[in-house]
Image (cartoon, rainbow, N blue to C red):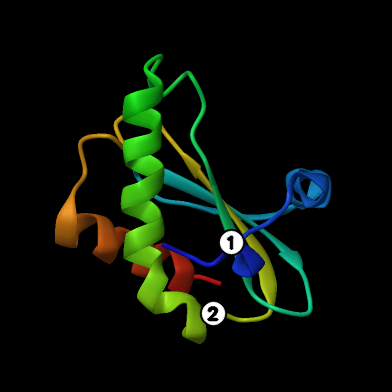
Amino acid sequence: MISKNRRIPRELFKPLLESRKYFNSAHFSLRIAKAETPRLTISVSKKVSKKAVVRNKIRRRVYSAVHNLMPELSDNLFLLIAKAGSENIKGQDLKDELVELLKKV
């Protein structure tokens, strides 16, 4: 899990959503905005799953997969948005997809 000071508070979502810099993969979309320290958050909408249990499971899997990558990230705000089907990707496949997505930055 990522520490609270590395996550993005709700107030900083607006600059991220207005940011024109974004990258896509099969199961995730990544939005980026400039910042002083690297911070990351994950958004899983009800379009992905109506069940909160499933949405939280996706969020926990992504946080644990990205935990080891945090020191390597550049000084930006990162918003990972889960797409439909992201609940089916697990383990090493999830890590590989996130590494490839974050390398595009």
Q: Could you tell me which secondary element the residue under label 2 belongs to?
A: loop
Residue pointed to by mark 2? 73
Classify residue 21 as left or right of residue 58: right
The answer to whether one can see residue 69 in this image is yes
Of labels 2 and 1, the one closer to you: 1
Badge 1 crowding class, 10 Å Cα cut-off, few under 14, some 14 to 19, many 20 or more, is: many
Q: CA distance from mark 2 to mark 1?
A: 10 Å
Outermost residue to the bottom = 72
Q: Residue at x 41, y 57 (%)?
A: 63
- Percent across and percent down for residue 7 are 62, 60
Q: Residue at x 41, y 44 (%)?
A: 59
- Percent across and percent down for residue 8 are 68, 56
Classify residue 23 as left or right of residue 26: right
Residue pointed to by mark 1? 40
Q: Could you tell me which secondary element the residue under label 1 belongs to?
A: strand
Classify residue 61 as left or right of residue 72: left
Q: Residue at x 48, y 19 (%)?
A: 46
Quadrant placement of the C terminus: bottom right
Q: From the viewer's perspective, is residue 48 above or below residue 2? A: above
The answer to whether one can see residue 27 in this image is no
Dividing the picture into quadrants, the one containing residue 67 is bottom left
- Percent across and percent down for residue 104 are 49, 70
Amino acid type for the residue under numbered disc 1:
Leu
Numbered circles on residues, count: 2
Dividing the picture into quadrants, the one containing residue 21 is bottom right
